[in-house]
Amino acid sequence: MSFIAKHITHRDERLMYLTRLHSILLIRGFLWMGILVSLGIYINWLILYKFEMLPSASVPFIPAPYSQIIDMMAGLIPALTGIMIFLIYLFKVWGTEIALTNKRMIYKTGLLFVQSSEVELAEVSEASVDNGWLGVPLGYGTIHLDCRFVGDFTIQTVKHPYTLVRQINKFRSGEAPVIPL
């Protein structure tokens, strides 16, 4: 059961549509991780083999197993940064839910520290989708909601954005859509 259905919706609300962020964010995180891990390996290769300058040589009192860790530290920093970037994207995809009820749209982020934003469907005056280059073939896009009193609402990298906008428009026009979850 989704977090929104369990904790955020009211008794008189029905959850009509639930979606998440697209997995293209995982590919973006994986690319960053690959680039930074490759950079770390290249830095280690330069230090250890090309220039043959070992950082532990300047500190002779450190025992052998620990000196090898010091020698690899320069390449380890970009590699760990790449892994952290991938984990940030992974937790963003896992922790984000976008729900449409019969009264409002709810955008929830976070796994441990949950933040939610919501907008009443009556307040939405316009909804638009920006797909970018790969959005249409891969099925994702950025949704821009122009709301009257709340301000603009933007949700990036949404799975099947046109389905969500179509359902928002049906609710605004007074039709009662039936959406299987």
Image (cartoon, rainbow, N blue to C red):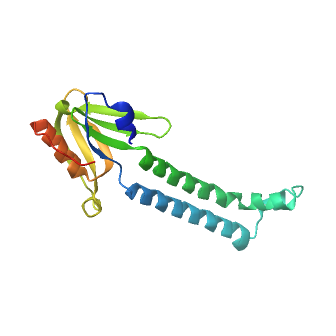
Residue 150 vs residue 166: left or right? right
Q: Which is nearer the eye, 150 or 41?
A: 150
Q: Residue at x 38, y 35 (%)?
A: 6
Q: Residue at x 28, y 58 (%)?
A: 139
Q: How many discs mark residues in the rendered view?
A: 0
- Residue 169, percent from left and from top: 14, 42
- Residue 54, percent from left and from top: 77, 64
- Residue 153, percent from left and from top: 27, 37
Q: Residue at x 15, y 43 (%)?
A: 177
**Which quarter of the picture shows residue 137?**
bottom left
Please, is residue 106 above or below residue 128 in the view? above
Residue 3 vs residue 126: left or right? right
Please, is residue 149 above or below residue 51 in the view? above
Q: Please identify the residue farthest to the bottom as the structure is shown.
A: 50
Please, is residue 41 above or below residue 12 in the view? below
- Quarter the N terminus occupies: top left
**Which quarter of the picture shows residue 42?**
bottom right
- Residue 134, percent from left and from top: 29, 62
